[in-house]
Image (spheres, rainbow, N blue to C red):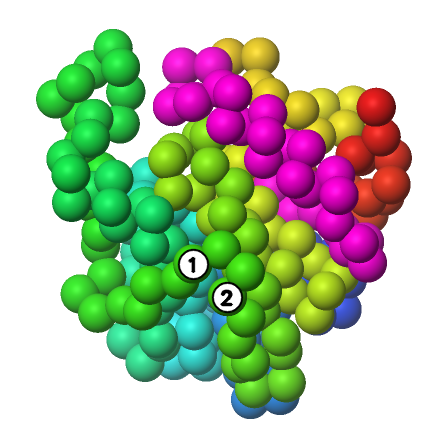
Amino acid sequence: MKKCDFHPVNDVIIINALFTEMFLVRTDRGFIAIDTGCHEAVIKKGLACNNIKPNDVKAVFITHSDIDHQNVVDLFEKAQFYFPKKELEMIEKRIPRFNYFPFIKNWVCPKKYITLNDNDSLSIDNLKVKCISLPGHTLGSMGYIIDDKYLFSGDAFRIINGKITVPKFKLFVMDLNEMKKSIEKVSQLEKVKYIFTSHTGFTADFTFAVSK
């Protein structure tokens, strides 16, 4: 295994994009990605370390519109992009990203994308992708459940001491009550075994992570 490889399970690759993570899930004919990270040079290096070409990525699922999750979309020219519809509504209404900085507003980086709703289900090559709306961090944040066992949650919550919870530093949370509801929603999921967050690592013990 090369130094920059990180494979918690055989079919999931994590690229550490400085202060966030990009996830790649292996399919029969390539990969699907969850988010794209922020720094193109870092993502290119992570792909190269794993012998993956940008065109091997067939689909990209964006969890939300913060720039550190979608800034490198142009690298994946052959990929189909998917974007949460509720997040798009926030952008179209020009809702400020931060209460303290009303001049900061998010936007959609991909030029072409398909919007997704809560409970939408897709099949990409051999993989089942189910959408789960997880608002709070942003108004339209969405998670993706792959093959019923891997939950990619974006910034919907943090993992602290093995449990999913709200962050201690809440500046980036748009609606704390909605985030708490999202955590409760996740706790009711069945079959999920792994939770992958974008900033606080992952857990292979779903039962403990959602326990009270």
Label 2 Cα crowd, 10 Å radius (few <14 / some 14-19 / many 20+): few
**How many angstroms separate mark 2 from mark 1 (CA)?**
6 Å
**In the rendered view, would you say 152 is above or below 56?**
above
On the rendered image, what quadrant is the N terminus found in?
A: bottom right
**Does residue 130 appear in the picture of this structure?**
yes
The x and y percentages for residue 58 are 44, 79
On the rendered image, what quadrant is the C terminus found in?
A: top right
Relative to 151, 141 lies left or right: left
The x and y percentages for residue 41 are 34, 54
Q: Quarter-wise, where is residue 127 in the image?
A: bottom right
Q: Is residue 106 magenta?
A: no
Residues at marks 2 and 1 touching, judged by CB atoms closer than 8 Å: yes
Q: Residue at x 53, y 81 (%)?
A: 124
Relative to 1, 90 lies left or right: left
> What segment carries the magenta color?
170-197
- Comparing 149 with 67, the one in front is 149
Question: What amino acid is labelled 2 in the image?
Answer: Asp
| Residue tagged 2 | 120
Question: What amino acid is labelled 1 in the image?
Answer: Asn
- Comparing 121 with 32, the one in front is 121
**In the rendered view, would you say 147 is above or below 66?**
below
Query: What is the number of the mark on residue 72?
Result: none
Relative to 62, 128 lies left or right: right
- Comparing 8 with 147, the one in front is 147
Relative to 154, 107 lies left or right: left
| Residue tagged 1 | 117
The x and y percentages for residue 149 are 75, 61
**In the rendered view, would you say 27 is above or below 99?**
below
Q: Residue at x 59, y 30 (%)?
A: 181
